[in-house]
């Protein structure tokens, strides 16, 4: 396996932290640099003390990261809105995996509605493949640009893609999703203040979460006749890692759990990170790239449950899964490890 | 205020624990006895060490609790299935508040379906008033028998009652509810093993939770033309106390958040424990009898959020609220205290 | 009971939060105002949503709190260093209870060493009684000024006072103390960021915690011949509330657990908030003003364990206990309630 | 690297869980069988759902595990007291790593005092090397039998070994140690019931923890003149993983932090899993085999802090580290991975 040179922009956050946890041990990769403007010159293991003894890297700034010319692949782990400014200035042949939402949406008006600003480089969006690995492998193998999905979007799409691709549902779908505090990022804010968050459960961003349009766009590309509507409601749960999505559908006709199982098995045959189980639980996917899927049926009512780790399959793990495909490697390279029990 | 003599059957569990935390300080009440067969003869503060220094009570057994003849009110905090055996042998004029599910359902077949056994004393059920205080105050003032609602039922009914009573919804309603580990009771079981539960989020009892039929029965009594369907999905969250319910409805016509607010304000005017807020959070109701309600609207889509403490408004707190009405006291007596922040 | 007018400076923090949770329901008190400069004009229940429906107070600023002239008692819940600037300007006959460290230490050099600044009003310090209630009741009844102890100091003093007052120990004492995240205050900071704090256990302020000198000063006033040394090491534990102190002493001579028990019983006879138990646990004191004390002995080795709630007996609870004495009430007034189980 | 055949007795507990998480991905190892009498015939990933998709192993019983004749190495992850019955019947040339306490202590009377039963096969104890890797590498390379240290013992020894080996301390040493709930094992018991444990902090086994004598025995073998005494006090903290030990020593003479640092650097030079840091924190070692060590000095007072993961460096991780040495591999093989941040 030839070693490729990768860089990370935005390496001090949790996305960067998880990228490093994977990439420092990936057999095909050298981490050429990690950039984080607020940490320039400081050791990477100051921001990520779990990595002490495992790397001597120091943070560079974005400007000083001119090693880009010798780089094979760049991960962008920046806050929403930064990638769309940076990408136009990056080399055309550089492989780029953007973990932010900047290049996921094709429609500039929808982008502006959900992200609150105009998109300055929307023309570049069409070069990006949406990195929901399990449905876009063929395109991912060939692309130089990946828009990595949002964490909630990944969870909801894993649950809905098999159903929508077979047009099994009718009418309104409700996706009730819950996330841990790591989804809010590495910066201390009131919503992640330990004394309150430890006993908090609350809803946020009703009807307006920015992951909603990428789900809708993807499902419509799968089945153009699908017209939703999809209600996505996100919640803060008092845990650190994990997303749990409960997705409520009405089926076209009464169906058995076994029949639903066949649909999911067919859809995810060969997808080693999707595990079909009787009762998904965040406890069994945390710290891993696995997504566990289960379901319950009652006549025409179907509930699909998806559990995944928001920082792994919901961010850095899926990003590396996509990188593996872009470089022609097995998509499981560097990712085939479980989280702990307990 | 004349002091009345109350007893508790099943005082070693969390329902009993919270009843004691309230009743020992209630200005109208003497706790005459606390029965728990496995703890007979031991001090109550051995089971509930938070009460050390606040009571010298010891547990009696059910059989030895013959003080019943001098009792004014008996709380039954037993596992489902015990009350229906005990109640027929209790004095007719004794006020009884049953925290279990035994006397909530009017239909024996539905009881058997959800509780897995035949009901031996269903004829007595009609003497019981369903203790969802906010809609049944008039009946509660006059009754000697209360079937205290289930925790999930309380949360969902608080959210749905104003809407259903005005026939504002159309079609399927989805109630996605999450509970803390205290809902599983005081006995250590695998599902509440700290190493796993601390990072667990999972669903359970799809389409089959025993609180579903009491919600449906209550809403149908409110508006006989309402025919659901109602999907109730319960989840285990990695917190100790609290229920958070997200209730997804389709409205009859496009409505504003203000209009929904007027409906809730009218419904809960004079209900001191229901607080209408912008964003309910378990953190602000824990350890208290308050239920916080919020909502979001988008055209005809409405999501109602309810947060409450499963052991308080969802069990012992509402039970005492009902007792207060039964004895002619203000329903807030002994209950008007906040939980802590944080 | 005549109602007295109390005010709070610094009412938006956790000390203020707990003061309000107690004082709003205290039978002898009206809360005249709550001041917090950053919240002026906003409702108190915005900062403390647990209090919704229980108060209509709004925050005032310090300057606008000129109701001070009609005030009977002022609680100062400000960051260290503010009280010593404010107190000289306050009316002489106003009762003041300072929750900060400003007036605990008699020696200006020691104050400067531990608090990092010179004390501008040290001459006023001698008017303050150190508010470790259990040993200073007589002085508290008569004083107009109370320096309320630090949370760690309260825990360690509860464990050591009976031993030192009888000169039972010899040589070095080690106090290993652990606190929950609420001890860091209501402002989100990196050390209380939920994703990290949830799995954190670490030590801080070795040999330099500002609560050390107030413990030493108090014990020397109890027994002038006691000369320590005392090692105090504080730790951050991944819980919200509570302090647990393990205090390691060497006894003058081999002693039995029963003999130690007699010493503690005698010392805390009549002290309703000190409970002598076999194994203290933060779980049983959280949200309450109780401090649970236990011990283990092996020959001349003694370990004393103290569990208390850092915001209650370690701050606001003890402050109200002291206020009760200052106004001639039972010290338990408004405080005699348990925390919940669970 | 030749692949060796390993088996696990007691594979359903947390030690077994972590052994599998490491060994299934270890480049030199095939897991030949996993035995757990209560799970015979069931899939390993039923007990450890984190391993779904990563193994098809099923549990065997101890009796049916007669593959032992073709086995190279057997891990014993059984409750204390079982290994000492099993080992006499196992083949002489089989490499055995015992995670229980059965073969750690040389003195039968001390074993009986701390483990509450007589040792039936104490003569075999002398064949066992105590598996505190960092001091026993030479013996571990040559042995066929390893008594893997206890979790608390590992933490305390890491902190004390460099000091005692240079005779730097005088008199009494206090080790105050705190552990997460995973230390109590995989079976739900009252002490690990989530509703209570989530807010619990308490002490247990004062002066009587079974890890005390193995620490004392090891330190005396390091420096025969060392005579303690050592006080070990263990605590339950409301976290899942991790041990944090605070070790209080009195130094022979005033020493600087730098001088202590030199002692630790010399002692652990070449020990890749011991990291010397300014402030150890369980958060940075969880899920990894690293132990972080820090210290604070004030004149002759020294406090050493050690943080490690009780299931990794404190159990399964160190066991594999020892296996690596026994088979002539780098001790880091299969273990050089960080835990996550957060």
Image (cartoon, coloured by chain):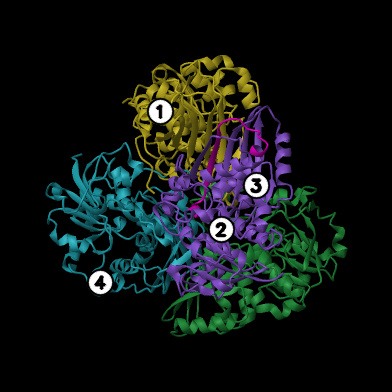
Chain colours: A purple, B yellow, C cyan, D green
Pick the front one: B36 or C338: C338
Given the image, what chain letter belongs to the residue carrying mark 3? A
Q: CA distance from mark 3 to mark 1?
A: 38 Å
Decide if residue A178 is in sight here. yes
Indicate the position of residue B226 as horizontal and vertical percent values: 51, 19
Query: Residue C126 vs residue C320: left or right?
Result: left
Residue at which label 3 appears? A292
Given the image, what chain letter belongs to the residue carrying mark 2? D
Query: Residue C293 vs residue B38: left or right?
Result: left
Which type of secondary structure does the marked residue at label 4 adopt? loop
Q: Quadrant of the N terminus of chain B?
A: top left
Pick the front one: C152 or B179: B179
Residue at which label 2 appears? D180
Residues at marks 4 and 3 touching, judged by CB atoms closer than 8 Å: no
Residue range (magenta): A164-183
Q: CA distance from mark 4 to mark 2?
A: 39 Å
Indicate the position of residue A311 as horizontal and vertical percent values: 56, 56
Residues at marks 4 and 1 touching, judged by CB atoms closer than 8 Å: no
Given the image, what chain letter belongs to the residue carrying mark 1? B
Q: Which is more foreground, mark 4 or mark 2?
A: 4
């Amino acid at each position: 396996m030839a070693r490729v040179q990768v860089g990370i922009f935005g390496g001090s956050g949790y996305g960067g932290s998880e990228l490093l946890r994977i990439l420092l041990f990936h057999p095909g990769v050298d981490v050429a640099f990690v950039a984080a403007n607020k940490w320039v010159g400081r050791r990477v293991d100051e921001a990520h003390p779990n990595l002490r003894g495992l790397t001597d890297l120091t943070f560079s700034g974005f400007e000083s990261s001119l090693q880009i010319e010798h780089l094979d692949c760049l991960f962008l782990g920046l806050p929403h809105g930064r990638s769309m400014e940076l990408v136009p200035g990056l080399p055309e042949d550089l492989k780029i995996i953007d973990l932010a939402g900047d290049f996921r949406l094709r429609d500039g008006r929808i982008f502006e509605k959900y992200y609150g600003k105009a998109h300055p480089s929307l023309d570049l969006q069409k070069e990006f493949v949406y990195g929901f690995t399990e449905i876009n492998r063929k395109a991912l193998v060939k692309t130089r640009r990946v828009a990595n999905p949002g964490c909630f979007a990944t969870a909801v799409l894993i649950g809905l893609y098999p159903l929508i691709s077979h047009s099994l549902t009718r009418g309104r779908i409700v996706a009730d999703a819950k996330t841990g505090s790591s989804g809010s990022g590495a910066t201390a804010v009131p919503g992640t203040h330990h004394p309150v968050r430890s006993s908090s459960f609350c809803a946020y961003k009703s009807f307006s979460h920015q992951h909603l349009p990428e789900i809708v766009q993807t499902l419509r590309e799968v089945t153009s006749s699908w017209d939703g509507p999809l209600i996505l409601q996100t919640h803060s749960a008092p845990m650190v890692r994990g997303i749990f999505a409960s997705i409520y559908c009405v089926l076209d006709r009464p169906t058995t759990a076994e029949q639903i199982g066949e649909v999911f098995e067919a859809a995810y045959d060969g997808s080693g990170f999707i595990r079909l189980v009787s009762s998904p639980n965040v406890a069994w996917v945390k710290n891993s790239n696995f997504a566990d899927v289960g379901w319950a049926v009652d006549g025409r009512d179907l509930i699909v449950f998806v559990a995944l780790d928001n920082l792994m399959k919901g961010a850095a793990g899926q990003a590396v899964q996509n990188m593996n495909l872009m470089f022609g490697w097995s998509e499981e390279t560097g990712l085939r490890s479980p989280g702990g029990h307990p």
